[in-house]
Amino acid sequence: MSTPIKHFRTRSFLVEAVQIVLGTTTKGDILRLCPLANVGVPVTVRDGLSAELSSTDLRWVQIPGIDGPLKARDHDWVVKADDEYLVIPPRRFTAWFEFDDVNAHEKSQMALPTNQLGEHDV
């Protein structure tokens, strides 16, 4: 007896994500999404005080994963899905997700006139 092939549909859910683009994405961009990320940038020390030279000169990005740290490289996406962080290559990310500007959607819904039943007039 063989195992039958089953068909699955992806669940619809929203995620937050930031794309790592060397020279553009900042350490702060990554830490806003994932506060526990390990992001390396060059540092200088002067008079016993250290200061970052450039927050966009990312040397490494490690994201905490379920099974240990995940390395993020140039053009990878760091994705927050529920309480889990993922690092997804660009081709897979664009195959799985599409941009959904939640704020723009909410604003457009507020601007639509509604009739007596609360339905939007089109």
Image (cartoon, rainbow, N blue to C red):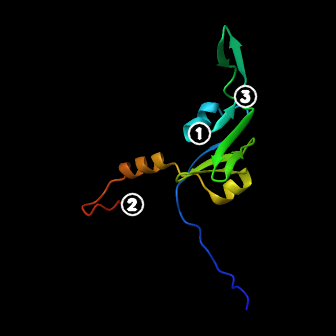
In the picture, the disc for residue 36 is: 1
| Real-space Cα separation, disc 1 to disc 2, in angstroms | 46 Å
Q: Quick one: SS at disc 2?
A: loop
Read off the residue under disc 2: 122
Circle 2: is it few (<14), some (14-19), or many (20+) Cα within 10 Å?
few
- Point out the tag, 1 or 2, that comes first from the N-terminus: 1
Foreground of the two, 109 or 28: 28
As drawn, 42 above or below 60: above
Circle 3: is it few (<14), some (14-19), or many (20+) Cα within 10 Å?
some
- Residue 122 placement, left or right of 42: left
How many marks do you count on the picture? 3
- When asked about the image quadrant of residue 52, the answer is top right
Q: Are marks 1 and 3 in contact (CB under 8 Å)?
A: no
Read off the residue under disc 3: 57
Q: Nearer the viewer, mark 1 or mark 2?
A: 1
| Amino acid at dot 1 | Leu
Residue at 68 percent of width and 49 percent of height: 68
Residue at 37 percent of width and 48 percent of height: 111
Q: Nearer the viewer, mark 3 or mark 2?
A: 3
Q: Quadrant of the C terminus?
A: bottom left
| Amino acid at dot 2 | Val
Circle 1: is it few (<14), some (14-19), or many (20+) Cα within 10 Å?
few
* Residue 54, horizontal then vertical, whole percent: 69, 23
* Residue 50, horizontal then vertical, whole percent: 66, 16
- Point out the tag, 3 or 2, that comes first from the N-terminus: 3
| Amino acid at dot 3 | Asp
As drawn, 37 above or below 4: above
Foreground of the two, 115 or 69: 69
Is residue 21 visible in the rendered image? The answer is: no
Foreground of the two, 91 or 34: 34
Residue at 70 percent of width and 47 percent of height: 70
* Residue 15, horizontal then vertical, whole percent: 55, 52
